[in-house]
Image: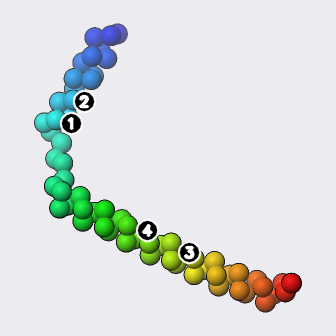
């Protein structure tokens, strides 16, 4: 049982160290900028929808 675990750990290390293609710093930076930009756009859209719905509801239910 313990040997199977050790073999599994060795296989995982071999996969990560030798078979996985890691992104370059430039690719990683570009991906991070894309994710941050998309997150900001989605946050602004949600904020705008919330503002519009709040305004409409305040007209429907004054007070």
Q: CA distance from mark 4 to mark 2?
A: 32 Å
Label 1 or label 3, whichever comes before in sequence order: 1
Q: Relative to residue 31, is residue 47 drawn left or right? A: right
Circle 2 crowding by C-alpha within 10 Å: few under 14, some 14–19, many from 20: few
- Kindly give the residue lying farthest to the bottom in the view shown: 59
Label 1 vs label 3: CA separation?
A: 38 Å
Q: Position of residue 43 (x, y in %)?
A: 50, 72
For residue 16, the mark is 1
Q: Position of residue 53 (x, y in %)?
A: 68, 81
Give percent across and percent down for residue 58: 78, 85
Q: Which marked residue is nearer to the observer: mark 4 or mark 2? A: 4
Q: Quadrant of the image for the C terminus?
A: bottom right
Question: Mark 2 and mark 1 in contact (Cβ < 8 Å)?
Answer: yes
* Residue 37 location, quadrant: bottom left
Q: Residues within 10 Å of mark 1 (few under 14, many from 20)?
A: few
Residue in the picture at 79% in, 89% down? 59
Give the vertical position of 27 relative to 50 (above or below): above
Q: Are marks 3 and 2 in contact (CB under 8 Å)?
A: no
| 58 with respect to 30 (left or right) | right
Q: Mark 3 or 4 closer to N-term?
A: 4
Residue behind mark 2: 12
**In the structure shown, which secondary structural element does the residue marked by tag 2 occupy?**
helix
Tell me the tag on residue 39.
4
Q: Give how far apart the Cα atoms at labels 1 and 2 are.
A: 6 Å
Structural distance between the alpha carbons of marks 3 and 4 = 11 Å
Instruction: Give the secondary structure at mark 4.
Output: helix
Quadrant into which the N terminus falls: top left
Residue 41: quadrant of the picture = bottom left
Total marks placed: 4
- The residue where tag 3 is placed is 46
């Amino acid at each position: 049982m313990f040997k199977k675990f050790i073999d599994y750990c060795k296989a995982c290390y071999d996969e990560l160290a030798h078979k996985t293609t890691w992104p370059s710093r430039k690719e990683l930076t570009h991906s991070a900028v894309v994710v941050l930009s998309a997150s900001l756009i989605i946050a602004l859209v949600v904020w705008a929808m919330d503002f519009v719905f709040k305004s409409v509801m305040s007209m429907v239910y004054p007070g």
